Image: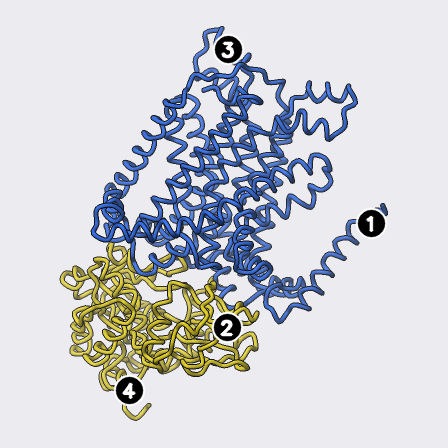
Amino acid sequence: MIRMPRVVVWAALLLGWEVFARLTADGFVIAAPTEIAQYVWRNTGLLWRATGVTGWVALQGFVWGNLAGVMLALAAVLIPRAERGLLTLALLAFCLPLVATGPILRVLYGPGQGPQVTLAALSVVYTTFLSVLVGLRAVPQSWLDLARSYGRGPVTLLALVRLPAALPYLVAGLQIAAPAAFLGAMVGEFTGAERGLGVLTVRALRGLDLPATWAVALLAAALSMAAFAGIGALGRRLSLAPPEILLAAPDDARGRAGASIQGIAAVAVALAVWQGAMDAFDLPRFFARRPGDVWDYLVTAPEAGAHRANLLAALGETLTVALPGYGAGLLLGAGLAALLTLAPPLAALVLPVSVALRSIPIIATAPLIVWALGRGAAGSITVVAVMIFFPTLVACLHGLARAPRPLMDLFDSYDAGPLRRLWGVQLPAMLPAFFASARMAVPAAILAVTTAEWLATGRGIGALMATVASTSDYAMLWSAIAVIGLAALATHAGVAALERAVLRRTSPEQLAG
Amino acid sequence: MTPTTPIRREALTPTRREALVLGAAALLTPRLARAATPATLQLSWLHSVQFAGSYIAQSRGYWGDAGLDVTLLPGGPNAPVEPPVVAGTALVGISAADYTAAAVNQGAPFRIIGVAMQKNPFAIASLAANPVADPRDLIGRRIGMALANMPVLEALCALNDVDIAGIEVVPTQYDAAPLVQGQVDCLLCWATDLPVAMRMQGIDSTVMLLADHGYAVHSQTYIATQDSLANRRADLVALMKGEIRGWGDYHAGPEAAANLTVQMFPDAGLDLETQKLQAERQVPLMFSDLTDAQGFGWFTDDTVAANIETLALLGKPVSADLWDRSILEEVYGAG
């Protein structure tokens, strides 16, 4: 193979982009690099100020959201009984759609950036919580036994054993969180903001201003990539070595019955939080419906049957798109991670594109996907896959890097090839991270599919929520939210069951409370 | 239009000398001296010339004159107007009769106290080469729209005896790209936004205003709760007084209003030429013989009756009680 200088490759790519954009100019789909450069040149001040506003909001949300995620993970390890409840609450909070949270946050905060910061924080809590939780568990049983034999309590265990073990996972969590916080900050501006990159995106899309749309999207992507790379570099600075070989006896103490009781308790807690929070802030029933209102609407009201039929039909349409997209995204993420392990140079291409796709709002990317793939199922499935493959990729890469060194050395000493090593050592080591990301991806898939339905297909629960929000039908909106939450919990429980079955054989330490 | 200059509006508009004196007074008097009452006006979209009358009222101190300190809250894709007004976060919201009717049917205690857009801005935009100039032209065409707006299309068809089964509805996001890319033949949109965007990109479009085909729905309406109407009357009167003066100035110079908008919101990403065109195109929607005779924001029993008819077609039955003209009457009565 002829090695071309990087500059030549980049120049060729840019030229190809320019030509393609010029050829498809009538379609108003792709902006040419020269047009984007012109826009940036003419609007440097505007872009600079907007970036400052959105970046600051994203940073605040990033800090608060990650703090909350880490605290939740610590609480879950210290109080194992609370884990399922915490997990349920974090999952449900992550599933709350913007059509419902937007108005509530705006009413709570009034003018200003409160809602944007909150939405940026909400978009990272759950993923960080899961990543850190896996990390806190990624400790060899022997270390824990050793510490316990010295009579150390759970707090010492946490500080001396679990926290250091969790650091690499925290880094992965923060890397996933960076683009998510940025996206959360941008989307947060949709709840009524005066300035910021989200405002500019809406303006550019409506104004058919392609160079502006692309400039803002590229800016958001570049900043997210920088944050992603920066956090990764910090992680390497801390020289987080792969763990020693993990050996532990499977812990099957918690039975199925215990788990389902905990699950029911968690849902009860979620309902109490729902009711309590709305009452505490004295939110008007008009737009902040309580659990009882939803029950009336779906069960006891005279037209409850029709309401249910409407809602379930929409849910069915949504699931037929969400599930294939979810599967495709997970496979794509894990597959790419494996591919990058076999051919590391590809990372320079794959990672930036992945980060970019994750940090640009779907409302900006969806038109492109629709243009390329149409308004049918293929487009929506792709939107879902695009939104979830990135966290899976990052988590799996970190998981692969955690492959125990002695085992790797062992395979090397037998002269096993890279494929054999991938299959025998690295993939099993990746499984905990893969399952964590499969759980992470549940709410992300829901968010993606509902957005695609709202913008492109006009079907399913996403379109239903958009319609009822515009007619102040908040009883149906909150019923849809409740049903989405239940669907997310059910999917999550299904993934968790599969995870237990697989990890019992490959990584028993993850199952220990 | 000029011969029947409304006497009442003139009474509200200060002469240039008065304005200078007022301006100087505003500069010299400390703000707190008058202890203006705070009030929030919830707009229905991001800042743009769509709300320029309010910006004029704010920048020229028309609300300050009336003892009110108004905060303008921008809207957005996920910022419905109704919740902050119900919650009391905003004293007044900019809504539209169909949205307000839906909210009232869901239990919101709203009244419409003024109407900024006498003619509804909803339109069907098509490319000039493949025009939809009459509702009958919709037959056999693909229309791009949010499915949430199905009732609008149904009402238009009912009003014009068009069989809706003959129209192919394509759910699209709200921008002109699907039309320009040929995914659809026409779009259901506002006459003042997507067609303006296409014009600025050099694309000629045919714009068929639904209001010209029997679709009578007041838009950009001022809504307040019955509680505010009972307990914050003076503030409502002061707010509408400022709005009416601001929009009076706007009518006199839409271009200046566009300039002011771009100046006041340098971070909103507004393009001056686009804003000027939009400012010009919304004038015929907001000002009519009725407003020339009675003043900005006015509505009559007849226009209300026409609205009730169209709203019934939209599946949003309301009674005339939804409209409350007492605030406007107080503003214009007091001169």
Vertical side of B84 occupied by A322: above or below: above
The answer to whether residue B30 of the structure is visible from this angle is: no
Three-letter code, disc 1: Met
Amino acid, disc 4: Asp
Specify the subunit that label 4 lies on: B
- Mark seen at residue A4: 1
Image quarter of residue B23:
bottom left
Q: Which mark is residue B289?
A: 4
Residue A121 location (% of width, % of height): 44, 42
CA gap between label 3 and label 2 equals 68 Å
Three-letter residue code for mark 3 = Ala
Residue at left offset 39%, top offset 55%? A191
Q: Secondary structure at mark 3?
A: helix
Q: Is residue B330 visible?
A: yes
Residues packed near mark 3 inside 10 Å, few (<14), some (14 to 19) or many (20 plus): some
Residue B303 figure quarter:
bottom left
> B67 or A187, which is in the foreground?
A187
The residue singled out by tag 2 in the image is B197
Viewer-side residue, A43 vs A117? A117
- Shown in yellow, the chain is B
Q: Label 1 crowding class (10 Å Cα cut-off): few <14, some 14-19, many 20+? A: few
